[in-house]
Amino acid sequence: MGPYYEHNFKTQVEKCEPPNQAIKAAMDSLINNGSQVHFGRWLIEGSPYVILFDIGAAAWNLDRWKGDLWNECSIGLPYHDREANDSLIFGSLVAWFFKELTDQLQDKPNVIAHFHEWQAGTGLLLSRSRKIPLATIFTTHATLLGRYLCAGNADFYNNLDKFNIDQEAGERQIYHRYCLERAAVHCAHVFTTVSQITAVEANHMLHRQADVVTPNGLNVRKFSAMHEFQNLHSMNKAKIQEFVRGHFYGHLDFNLEKTLFFFIAGRYEFSNKGADLFLESLSRLNYLLRVHKSDVTVVVFFIMPAKTNNFNVESLKGQAVRKQLWDTTQFVKEKFGKRLYESLLRGEIPDMSKILDRDDFTIMKRAIYATQIVFHPEFLSSTSPLLPMDYEEFVRGCHLGVFPSYYEPWGYTPGECTVMGIPSVTTNLSGFGCFMEEHVSDPSEYGIYIVDRRFRSADESCNQLTQFMFSFCQQSRRQRIIQRNRTERLSDLLDWRYLGRFYMYARHLALSRSFPSKFKMDHLNIAPVSPICNGFFYRRFLFSSRLRLFDQKYMKNDINTTVQKFGVSKFLFFLFLKDIKTFIQ
């Protein structure tokens, strides 16, 4: 369920009729009362059904719905906050829809509504205040105030218990948004966050402990290349090398075969995403490479969309010259090859001084001279005149992703690197970094380098990041290939097939709390475990077999039973099997 935008609906949704009569009746009720509701299949993998509400068409109800929100929840919204007003219109339509739907269904079956982020939370508030019979879940991917505080360079994690929350929200003129978020968190039957670090943050910012941590997964099958991912790395690396040849045209005084490509990607939040720390550590890395007389060159990409007027003229010129030189080379090579072939057919050793004529030399000289060109700007797309690659191709062609974020509730970028077999740097202040620390005994062995930004000073964190990158630069090509293999093996750990079970648990928990007479958690065949307690959970998991794991004859017979009983993947089973001695100690 979401807001309707005409252009997106036409290009991303296949319109169709609802297959469920109760949903159709609920939609018809809203439409007959002047609202516009659209139904269809979202044209993404899986083709899920979508119900989209036209916010603009219902905007004439805004003042009345503001009154309802104030009367029912004592929260007022200023007229100038467009986003908050849109969230109220959307939430009012959602609550209205759920009222009509539950009236149609009459608890056969029950309804679970999962709301993500404060913009959707108004629908949850109104549904609960109107006692609509449905189970509700609210997930925060990052607290509203947390983003604002970190963007303002506050020493956030060391002062979580010291912030005056109401005052901080008021000073930033987002108190009404904060109220919507906090009210949604406390009204939900089940509250979840996407990571352990965000659960800690939410406990202080929103004053409720998360019931379940629901980590963000990936559709690993989409990225899966089986044994081809090493070949894909080589192919896409060659494309990046071509870009570098053009970008550094006239200054290409380094060996591209001994050049490593690092990159950082994400929203242009300079401090939150760790770009400041990355730049400083690159300066220190440069110093170390010079001191040790390393023949390795590092080229770094910042993939952060920002406001631009046009492409850099010198970059365009370099790419145009590179392409023209390449085309000229291919033309001359074809003529050269033909003349060489004809000479050999005659049984003659060709005279190399005569095999190219004056016209050939003229063409090559002309290709060296400058060219003028104008392009319409695009960004990291296969149709870009600068770097004609999609993001996935670009990632596969790089050697190391560096994401030293200070504020990152989850962090998809290092996860995407992992499933594509590309090592990455993350931090213990990102959800992904904490997740890997919990699940993998030595993440760096698998190409996941975790910078400590929580318990070390900025200078110490910078030195640690520098050392990670310097150690990576010292690896041989063979060592990097081996490491990419190990990184790619972690893919299953991030697959929705496994991480989806935490969402399943959250839904069952919501049903048991909203309809306790019908649903009991004790009867559910699902492991009630969240990554919050993974340390204890995996110890319990390993010891539960009474150390029979050491006996090979039991391993094959009992593995499926053990895995099924504790609700974890075979991948995790084998991953932690090798560390059982450490756990025992």
Image: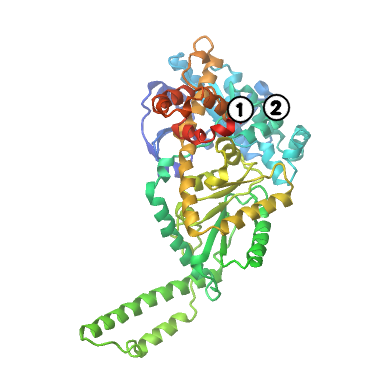
Percent position of residue 506, x then y: 53, 24
Residue 425 is labelled as: none
Q: Amino acid at mark 1?
A: Trp
Q: Is residue 193 above or below residue 482?
A: above
Residue 193 visible in the picture:
no
Could you say whether the residue bearing mark 2 is in a helix, strand or loop?
loop
Numbered circles on residues, count = 2
- Given residues 543 and 37, the one toward you in this image is 543
Q: Please give left or right for residue 125 compared with residue 329 in the image.
A: right
Q: Nearer the viewer, mark 1 or mark 2?
A: 2
Q: Residue furthest left?
A: 346
Q: Toward the viewer: 190 or 447?
A: 447
Structural distance between the alpha carbons of marks 1 and 2: 27 Å
* Residue 565 visible in the current orientation: yes
Q: Nearer the viewer, residue 400 or 143?
A: 400
In the displayed structure image, the side of residue 14 where residue 294 appears, left or right: right
Q: Which residue is mark 1?
A: 65
Residue indicated by mark 2: 207
**Looking at the image, which residue is at 55% across and 74% down?**
253
Instruction: State the image coordinates of residue 522 (x, y, percent, origin top left).
Output: 51, 14
Vertical arrangement, residue 310 with respect to residue 359, above or below:
above
